[in-house]
């Protein structure tokens, strides 16, 4: 079973997926239409690339500030959050999910990111 | 070729970068390390702008935004201007932004 | 509204900081012996505000196109770095070591 399939089965996770850093492929599972998943993968990829660059810029300006290479990010809305680690993303219901469990699952299963976006 | 940008009023630095962010060539009132840093910043910023513009197109369903032709980041005294894989640092008080952009577009399509 | 004094007391928090809507660091507290500096926190503030802005654009677009509400307004951005995690909500943030990060406790304290 793939990481995103397992992730999609965690409590409160509405949908989960993975995208290629090149932007040419994506897969998903959960309560989301295919077009929504395509849009979500484009958004998450863009933010991941931006976050990596920002972390690298931070590192360039402050030697070894501990932020690069970026491992992941999370954005929190009123009802939902988006959690991303490496090239795996998920949409989470804030009221029914444990963000800690979701992020720990991602950390344990996606693994340490080297910064190589391939 | 890009060196001719320095002939325009207010252009302090010009440089060109590869698609991986490495400096190809650079000229002007900065040392080599600073010019390489400007190239790296411009490369990073270009990718961020591209990602955001792609999303703007996706959400608005409106053509004409992507791929972006360039960008300008402007502060009180200076601005960083980029078209294609070229970037300039200009003095706002001395440079004509229209002239700089026109010349950069010309060079980008050379 | 949370206070920097209460945020820095949270388990695992190395730094607590407050920033303006434009990303400028307005106040901060760092735990004893931490290597985090004012300069790092100022840059982090700008980074987080930049990403909240982008996420707000994404949330607006997403909600308009899909009709799926619940993202807007964006409350905060979290960066999971190599060694550190920065968690922000509105105009406050905390930095925690990845080894001892507790997202829920941080959000709960930041949302107070």
Image (cartoon, coloured by chain):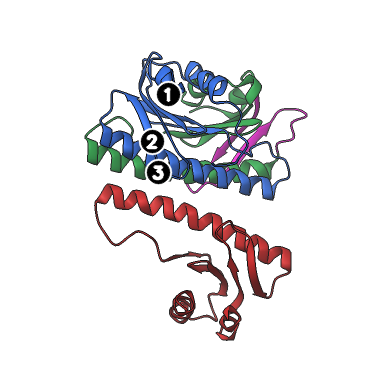
Indicate which disc, 2 or 1, sits on the residue closer to the N terminus.
1
Where is residue A64, by image quadrant?
A: top right
Instruction: Give me the disc on residue A26.
Output: 2
Pick whichever, C16 or C67, lies toward us. C67
Q: Bounds of the magenta span?
A: C13-36
Name the tint of chain A in the rendering.
Answer: blue
Residue at 70% over, 46% down:
A62
User: Secondary structure beneath disc 2?
Assistant: strand
Does label 3 lie on the same chain as label 2? yes
> Height in image: B32 above or below B52?
below
Residue at 48% over, 42% down:
A21
User: Secondary structure beneath disc 3?
Assistant: loop
Outermost residue to the right: C33
Name the tint of chain C in the rendering.
Answer: green
> Height in image: A96 above or below B28?
above
- Circle 1 Cα neighbour tier, 10 Å, few/some/many (<14 / 14–19 / ≥20): many
Task: Give how far apart the Cα atoms at labels 3 and 1 are.
Answer: 18 Å
User: Secondary structure beneath disc 1?
Assistant: helix
Label 1: chain letter: A
Label 3: chain letter: A
> Height in image: C47 above or below A9?
below
Q: Position of residue C100 (x, y in %)?
A: 64, 20
Let me know if residue C29 is in the magenta part: yes
Provide the residue designation for mark 3. Answer: A24
Let me know if residue B37 is in the magenta part: no
Q: Judge from the rendering whether residue A90 lies leftward or rightward of residue A59; answer left or right.
A: left
């Amino acid at each position: 079973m793939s990481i995103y399939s397992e992730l999609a089965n965690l409590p409160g996770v509405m949908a989960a997926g993975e995208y290629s850093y090149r932007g040419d492929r994506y897969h998903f599972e959960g309560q989301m239409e295919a077009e929504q998943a395509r849009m979500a993968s484009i958004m998450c990829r863009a933010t991941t690339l931006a976050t990596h660059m920002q972390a690298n810029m931070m590192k360039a300006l402050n030697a070894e500030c501990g932020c690069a290479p970026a491992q992941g990010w999370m954005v929190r809305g009123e009802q939902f959050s988006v959690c991303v680690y490496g090239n795996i993303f998920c949409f989470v219901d804030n009221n029914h999910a444990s963000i800690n469990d979701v992020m720990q699952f991602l950390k344990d299963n996606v693994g340490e990111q080297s910064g190589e976006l391939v | 070729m890009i060196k001719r940008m320095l002939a325009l009023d207010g252009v302090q630095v010009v440089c060109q970068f590869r698609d991986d962010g490495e400096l190809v060539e650079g000229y002007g009132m900065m040392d080599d390390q600073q010019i390489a840093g400007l190239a790296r910043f411009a490369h990073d910023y270009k990718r961020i702008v591209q990602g955001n513009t792609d999303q703007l197109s996706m959400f608005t369903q409106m053509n004409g935004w992507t791929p972006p032709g360039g960008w300008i980041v402007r502060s009180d005294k200076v601005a960083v201007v980029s078209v294609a894989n070229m970037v300039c640092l200009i003095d706002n008080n001395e440079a004509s932004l229209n002239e700089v952009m026109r010349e950069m577009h010309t060079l980008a399509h050379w | 509204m949370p206070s920097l004094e209460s945020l820095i007391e949270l388990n695992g928090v190395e730094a607590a900081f407050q920033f303006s809507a434009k990303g400028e660091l307005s106040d901060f507290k760092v735990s004893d012996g931490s290597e985090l500096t004012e300069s790092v926190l100022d840059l982090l503030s700008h980074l987080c505000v930049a990403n909240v802005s982008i996420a707000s654009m994404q949330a607006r677009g997403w909600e308009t196109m899909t009709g799926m509400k619940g993202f807007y307004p964006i409350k905060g951005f979290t960066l999971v770095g190599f060694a550190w995690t920065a968690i922000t909500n509105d105009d406050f943030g905390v930095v925690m070591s990845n080894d001892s990060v507790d997202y829920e406790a941080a959000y709960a304290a930041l949302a107070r």
